[in-house]
Amino acid sequence: MAEEPMLEAKNIVKYLGEGAAQVQALKGVNLDLMPGELTLLMGPSGSGKTTLLSILGCILSPNSGMLTLARHTATGMSPEQLADLRRQHVGFVFQSYNLVPTLTAAENIMLALDLRGAPPSEAPALAAKALQQVGLSHRAHANPSKLSGGEKQRVSIARALAGSPSVILADEPTAALDSENGKGVMALLAQVAKDASRAVLVVTHDHRTLSYADRLIRIEDGRIVGRARRRAAPKNLSSQSQPVA
Amino acid sequence: MQQAVSSPAVAAPSRGRPMPMVAKLAYRNLFHDRLSLVVTLVGIVFSVVLIAVQFGLYIGSEVRIAAMLDQTRGDLWVIPYGTKSFDDPTFLEGQVKHPVLSTPGIASVEELVAGFVGWRRPQGGTTAALLVGSDTTTNTSLPWDIVQGSIRDLAAPSAVAVDRTYFEELGIKGIGDRAEINGTAVTVTTVTDNIRSFTTLPYVFTSLVMARTLLGTSPDLSSYAVVKVAPGHEIEDVRKALITRFAPSQAGQTPDAEILTHQEFRKRSLNRWLFETGAGAALITGAALGLIVGVVIVAQTLYSSTKDHLNEFATLRALGASAGYIIKVILMQAVLSAIIGYILGIMLSLVVIWASRNDPSLLIIMTPNLAALLFVLTVGMCVFAAVCAIFKVIRIDPAVVFSR
């Protein structure tokens, strides 16, 4: 039986702005994310990458087209329903980490767990486990201001993983990092993508990340202009790795 | 692929019940910007103290206005028709004690005589005073808070009781000092402590007979008759009987006397001094201003704090936080500010009240009910002030997280 995509976007069209300033940011995009795969979405500035990421992450609604996330049809949902859907099924990794500066590394993860309805009594242990998976157990009680860029991004990944979402969406996760930390973060995302219950999409400009990808998708001017598989999908995904958190 | 390096050390889960994340986030946001927190707390404390003092003065005014009524504890008051308060005395028409006593259901009746007099100081000069005469052989409630002498001493000829907080105004130093009331010599035999009138006129207590003499009125006239209803009788039934007894002889005429319950006369007196004079309205307006100032300061600082943390709120929204979750964070910040501000404010208010205890002209009273009301007002004020911040935060577009 064919593997079902974790996320499926069909003929997504999105207009931004109004009146004379209106532009068509996405012009019928088709895309799916398969479990156990790390997909890279690449394209020049203004190509529609961020708009597509926002729609795939249920932050923006498309003007037309259909989006299915973890077997839920997201099209036509209200903002609160979309928030509920992304809370349950989407983990985000941001270029600027977007950690809450007043909370420690562990508390940032516990916050995400709290949003996802994890029992408060279990949250500290789950957060500790997530930090262990990204190799930052020793930094659990550090505030973001005391963490390096690479450490912040690892905490951000641990936060995205908290609650085991179906899809991880990463927006330029290596853009603010040096080469060494960038490699570490991509390796971590690639490891995360080995989980058969999860798909990972990384939006990036960074060609150094190509070696970590299972699939490449190129977008230009609001259209998908190229797709390539860099390596065959694993035959038995579930035996490859254990869920991270 | 490169494997993430795992550390063997795992952060241990905290013991006990963890603080809810909403509360933790609100608490951390609040204490993140100390200066903003200080400004918020100053606003709340200012507001709490202002409201506490204004309402404390209001309660103090109530106590002073109603002191004479509360002290006598009558069930019913027979008063000259149209009397607005105890401190606004005239005389009842004719003899009232015996008509009252002959009404069924009466346990006792106490005549009181009150009137304005001129008090001539021993050193010269005259000041106005309110003379209150009662039967010192049967009445044990007026005057009260006696610190020197006794009620019985007032039975002596020309004996009067004055309050020691009025000594300077009355030109006397203590027991045995002599002065003149309306040209008649009187001697201070009894001294009370802190029986002060709302009108600032000194009360001078004496016997019923002496009061009638000093006021130059007929020996059977009185200003008020304080009635106690006999056990087993309804106050309302007795009142109806008294109204009938004091009804005008001809239909259409205005009666000479009114029969009020203790609460009715109290309410009328409070209404007279607190609202007809505008004194109470001024106190309430002061409290309202305190509330408004508090709302404005808290709203401004909370809005500013929310703007400072907008990126975090947008991130929360992007992570799937419902609007309700974010509103809870803001409200929690407001409530935390309110609790801290209230504790500091109530402490400062108690200090202000303690500092004013030696000023007899100021009576600021803090009661448990007022403290509870202040807490509710403070929390309500801060929650109301959070509305602007909430409007700001629920309009956040979570997509902004990708552009930062």
Image: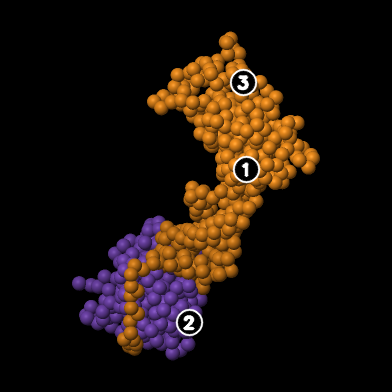
Chain colours: A purple, B orange
The chain identifier of the residue carrying mark 1 reads B
Q: Which residue is at 58% across, 40% downward?
A: B150
* Residue type of the residue flagged with mark 3: Asp
Q: Which residue is at 46% across, 60% downward?
A: B332
- Name the front one of labels 1 and 2: 1
Q: Which residue is at 56% across, 22% downward?
A: B258
Residue under label 1? B191
Residue under label 2? A146
Q: Which residue is at 68% across, 42% downward?
A: B176
Residue B117 occupies which quadrant of the picture? Answer: top right
Residue under label 3? B220
Mark 1–mark 2 distance (CA, rounded to whole Å) = 72 Å
* Residue type of the residue flagged with mark 2: Lys
Evaluate whether label 3 is on the same chain as label 1: yes
Mark 3–mark 2 distance (CA, rounded to whole Å) = 91 Å
* Residue type of the residue flagged with mark 1: Val
Q: Position of residue B161 (x, y in %)?
A: 63, 38
Mark 3–mark 1 distance (CA, rounded to whole Å) = 28 Å
